[in-house]
Amino acid sequence: MTTGLWIILDHVVALLSIAMWFAAGVTLALRRPRLALAALVAAMLVTLVRGVTVTILAGQGWWFVQEKVLLGLPMLGAAAAAAVLLAGPQLLAARRGRGDGSSPAAVVSVLGAAYAALAGLVVTFLVGYPLTLTAALITISLVCAGALLTARVVTSPADSTADAGVAQAPEGGRTISRRRFIGWTGGAVAVTAAGAGTGLSFLPAESVTLGGGAGRSARSAVSVADLRGSRSPAPGGIVRRHVLTAKKATVRLASGREIEAWTYNGEVPGPAITATQGDLIEVRLHNADIEGGVTLHWHGYDVPCGEDGVPGVTQMAVGPGAEFVYRFRADQAGTYWYHTHHASHIGVRKGLYGALVVNPRGGQRADEHSAAEQVDLTLPVHTFDGTVVIAGKDGRTEHPAPPGTPVRLRLINTDSEPHRIVLAGTPFRVAAIDGRDLNQPGEVRDVSLHLPAGGRYDLVFAMPDTSVALVVDDDRDGGLRLRPRGDASGGVPVEDTSDLPLLDLLRYGAPAAVPFDARKADRHFTMVLDRGVAMVDGRPAYAHTVNGRGHPSIPDQLVAEGDIVRFTVVNRSLETHPWHLHGHPVLILSRDGTPSTGSPLWVDTFDVRPGETWEAAFRATNPGIWMNHCHNLPHAEQGMMLQLRYDGVTTPFSGSRGGAAGHVH
Ligand SMILES: [Cu+2]
């Protein structure tokens, strides 16, 4: 069973224990001793089972159980023990026909256990990892307050004879009644805990985390505004000039449907930008009418930080009427993409994206494939109003490919959710992931691929003499077809693809040397991904969190140029998070403790599924202030975003708009 399933099972058991403790408390209050005894026994058993699920989860990592082990279970254990000691003997006596088993103390203690069980689950959902003293103290005070209120209700005058001797202690007498003493003590505990917890929450939070490395040095500062790209191509390269105008437009999809899109140059996807290694790419971004502003972020491309297109960090958002010129040398070959990074959860979904393909020097150019008799298709996969569209710039979903033709399909997931990809009708190789070639990728067939949000796969094969189908999300009628004779005559029906096993890319291809030893990391950052209550952009929200906090309250990660940096990314939530660091490819080291044993896997986005723990590393060779975030863009918007900052780099920009007026370089 996966950790993700254990997390869900633990939630179910926790819910059951809450239900059982409440059932015991309510039946006891209603003086139904038989039912109460049965519910109490069931509650005890479920609580013990909870101990088992938490122990198993603990085996998967401390971050999955910290709040349960330190607060939830001890609190429930103490309350449960009190409940059994107070209510148990009376219920057993009632079973033998003596009394109705229901004293106020018994009812309060059993309901107290129910509150403790409920509070434990609430803490798991609203706080998670790491558990703070604030959260613990406030939780304990709420449980105490709940028990005190219950005590008031069940010891109302009508019931007070059940507590004979104590309830009838004379008012103003010399001895303070036991019940009153307990009430005052409990109240004092509740108030003190709540006050201390609330007070602690006002302590200033850490603004930077060092990952075990040195703190900020006194080295002279450089501004991201000065970290700009080269202005000339490499020898032999040319300048590739583009003008991209962001504007609203009605766009007709290949299916004939019309959508109200946000576009670059009126097209969705935007114009494909192609280059050969060594060329200079120069893109003048102009905003016609996107009110909130736009930028261009070169996803997966390690541009100098000043070209990275993050509003409020590397530039100001480009407002209507303004423009910004991006320049960088196309040093890396491969399949990449560009998209707006301003309010990207809306802009990218509405169409502000396009492909960036750089061909190796001396190799074939994607834009000249017809001359070279090869098929090279760039295929952004995007969902418009619930319909998955996979098509190149001409919108066609059928392509001719004579038998024997070398084919390269460049898949780009421009959505916020992963896609399941199947190539049916031919063996193939995954030649590159996120733009980087794999080492000795073996031929595979009848497998499925899991393409993370933002990720790219280059699939290569020689065209067979029957048709080939690219199937996305097991939709056998959609996707893309390659026909050996250009018509449907070579067509074979696509079989059900839903049972095909997943190709594990951590065991695909052959190992090769990597440029650094990840075991000698200079810094190590752990990011625990979850949902919970946190501040996002100054407002409390049910946020997507990193280490219990939301953007921009998540501490910056500080690195120094040359550092080897290691990430541990843990997902204790119930959703998949495609983790994306700007400006650097990361090397995948392991998933759930199992090392990567195939080709070195360099990616810019890796999917961390519920319950998974990934280790990755990179060398800090590209100074700047870089976003490090979930590429499920609504998740990023809801808090799951932080900055990785090089020592000595500063930014003159702030907010997301800054002074959005014209800012041309
Ligand atoms: Cu996410």
Image (spheres, grey):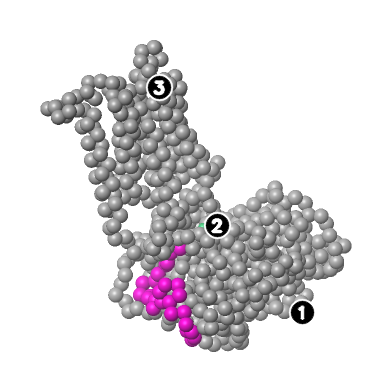
Spot occupied by residue 624 in the image (x, y as percentages of width and height): 43, 74
Spot occupied by residue 136 in the image (x, y as percentages of width and height): 33, 46
Disc 2/disc 1 C-alpha distance (Å): 37 Å
Asked if the stretch drawn in magenta spans residue 660, the answer is yes
Residue placed under numbered mark 3 in the picture: 31
What segment carries the magenta color?
641-665
The 10 Å Cα crowd at callout 1, few under 14, some 14 to 19, many 20 or more, is: few
Residue placed under numbered mark 2 in the picture: 607
Disc 3/disc 2 C-alpha distance (Å): 53 Å
| Circle on res. 371 | 1
Which residue type carries mark 3? Arg
Q: Secondary structure at mark 3?
A: loop
Q: Are marks 3 and 1 in contact (CB under 8 Å)?
A: no
Please tell me which residue is depicted at 23% across the width and 40% down the height of the picture. 188
Spot occupied by residue 160 in the image (x, y as percentages of width and height): 28, 24
Please tell me which residue is depicted at 43% across the width and 32% down the height of the picture. 22
* Closer-to-camera residue (466/89): 89
